[in-house]
Image: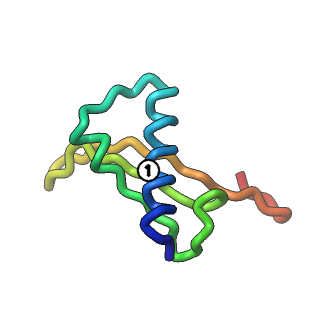
Amino acid sequence: MINKEQYQKAAARALQYFDWAGIRLTEAERGAIEVADFGLSDLDNIGLEILTYVNTERVCAKEEELKAAVTEQGGL
């Protein structure tokens, strides 16, 4: 599990990546970033930040910033 400070840091980092990619967000969207550590408490190597624009029964639109560790046995 991550603490609140780690969550906020990860969300801020995601906002920097979205800005770098030219993705412009409203203030409401900037405050709606979700952070997942998959229970591993290692956001720097394995983590996911998600911004959901639309989520209905028929359609979903999201921006994601994913970090995945490269392992000795292969990986990304």
Q: Residue at x 25, y 36 (%)?
A: 27
Q: Is residue 59 above or below residue 1?
A: above
Q: Is residue 12 above or below residue 36?
A: above
x, y percentage for residue 66?
54, 50
Left or right: where 53 falls relative to 51: left
Residue drawn 70% across and 58% down?
69
- Provide residue 49's location: percent of width, then percent of height: 45, 52
Viewer-proximal residue among 64 and 5: 5
Question: In which quarter of the view is residue 42 placed?
Answer: bottom right
Q: Position of residue 64 (x, y in %)?
A: 44, 46
Query: Is 55 in front, or is 18?
Result: 18
Q: Which residue is at the front of the view, 36 or 5?
A: 5
Q: Amino acid at mark 1?
A: Ala
Residue sitting at 21 percent across and 41 percent down? 28
User: Pointer 1: residues within 10 angstroms few (<14), some, or many (20+)?
Assistant: many
- Look at the picture and state if 24 lies above or below 74: above
Considering every residue shown, the one lying at the far top of the view is 22
Residue underneath mark 1: 11
Residue positioned most to the right: 72
* Label 1: which secondary element: helix
Colour setting: rainbow
- Number of marks drawn: 1
